[in-house]
Amino acid sequence: MDFILDIGTWISLLIGSFFLLITGFGLLRFPDLYTRIHAGGMADTLATAIICFGLALQSGFTLISVKLLFIVIFVFLTSPTATYALAQAAFVAGLKPKLDGFGGPAKTTSTNARDD
Amino acid sequence: MEEFTDIFLMLLLVAGSLAVLYVRNLFVATMLLSAVSFLMALLFVTLDAVDVAFTEAAVGAGISTVLYLGTLALVGSNERPTAKLSVIPLLLSLSIGGALVYATFEMPTIGSPDTPVQTSNVTKRFVEVSPIEIGIPNMVTSVLASYRGFDTFGETTVVFTAAIGVLLILSQKHIRRREDDEEDSTPRPAVSVEKSHDQVGSPHDLIPHVVSKILIPFIFLFAFYVQFHGDFGPGGGFQAGVIMAAGFILYSLIFGLHITKQILPLRVVELFLAFGVLLYGGVGIVSMIKGGNFLDYNVLSADPIAGQHIGILLVELGVGITVTAAMLAIFYGFAGRAQGRGKDVN
């Protein structure tokens, strides 16, 4: 039984790390602010949840698992909100996306793209 | 593995600090500084100093970042370029840095058993006798609130004095009152760096409003937990006060300073600011009246250990109230200034 739990933990940790790695690549490689926070906000939240699940497998039905669950709930609420607030603030400030949503560059050239 | 974590965190710390120095945009520098503070908190956790890590994460990464942002809203976000190379500050910082590095050669290695802290008789006495004398599991709290109660009283007074100083410098009552009258016709929120003033109340803010309404009660609950669980685990008045203030500041950032001031006016904050210190000092006076020394909790109850518990609880409560009020007073000071000149900012 312990062996199966260990394998489950390892799989969860690896998947979570994979998503975190993707987050890092996305933050570096994506062209503008909106795509970058898209990478940072979504994969990050999922990775936290998966990693905490893997850790909870190790601790079993204890208080530690409850704390991990609280961490997941907290991150699940706050991280997308922060992403949303950031995108909202950038949009209100007049930052135009660089891409048009169909894989090409946006037609209207952004005037104040100071995202990097 | 632990060495790897330590080295990794310290490298990040160095990189972050250098980045703070090199970056010219002050907003970016503030955010980097917040990240550096958070790294410091992580380092404190790896050193098992959870009480300090709490404070660093809440003050360094949280509240001081908000204060910096409030300041930047007043002064603008771009550093003025300085062309000339100044030699004396460079020499000064190099020599101080060199002296500090030289001093680290004298420091004992981490975890070595023969450091002065490990072998000192004072440490031995605290570790052996404090569970009997004070009877609470968290030795940090028993040292901080009971053995060194007088020092902590001094610290609380310092926090109190700092808040009074900030209020004196930043409040400028007569100027602000005039501007408040102007603003009564058009209610505007506090300086919130993340949002434009015109957007408050629009449907775009619905998500932050709802999520913060869900979170803020739990932040307050956590603050009370940290306050009253400080005898048994990491925590205490300082940490709880900062977390409590962070809850109010979050509310103020999302809903606006004028609404927060309706809930908790500056006058009430000033009252609490003084009340915390008075509560702390009052415990000392009561213990003197009951025939002990100043801040000698043994005489507070018939049973010395119960007396210690009552004393520590009240004293930590005083610290918590003062720290909450001080943080809020400083925040009100900064944000009120930014609000008064809000028309120039955006």
Image: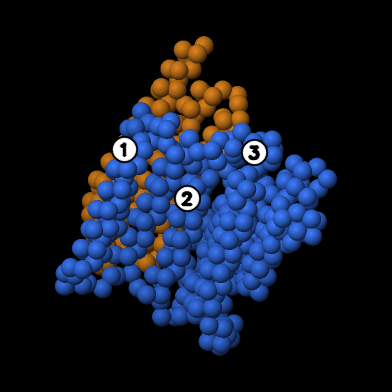
Q: CA distance from mark 2 to mark 3?
A: 29 Å
The x and y percentages for residue B208 are 52, 57
Task: Name the residue nearer the viewer: B301 or B11.
Answer: B301
Front of the two marks 2 and 3:
3
N-term-proximal mark, 2 vs 3: 2
Q: Colour of chain B?
A: blue
10 Å crowding of disc 3: few (<14), some (14-19), many (20+): some
The x and y percentages for residue A46 are 44, 37
Q: Secondary structure at mark 1?
A: helix
**What is the three-letter code of the residue carrying label 2?**
Ala
Residue with the mark numbered 3: B130
Question: Height in image: B137 above or below B339?
Answer: above
Residue with the mark numbered 1: B7
Seen at 80% across and 56% down, the residue is: B290
Residue with the mark numbered 2: B57
Residue B89 appears in the figure: yes
Q: Chain of mark 3?
A: B
The x and y percentages for residue B334 are 49, 72
Q: Chain of mark 1?
A: B
Q: CA distance from mark 1 to mark 2?
A: 20 Å
Determine the residue located farthest toward the front in the rendered image. Answer: B121
N-term-proximal mark, 1 vs 2: 1
Front of the two marks 1 and 2:
1
Give the chain ID for the orange colour. Answer: A
Image quadrant assignment for residue B277: bottom right
Q: Secondary structure at mark 2?
A: helix
Image quadrant assignment for residue B243: bottom right
**What is the three-letter code of the residue carrying label 3?**
Ser
Question: Height in image: B264 above or below B56?
Answer: below
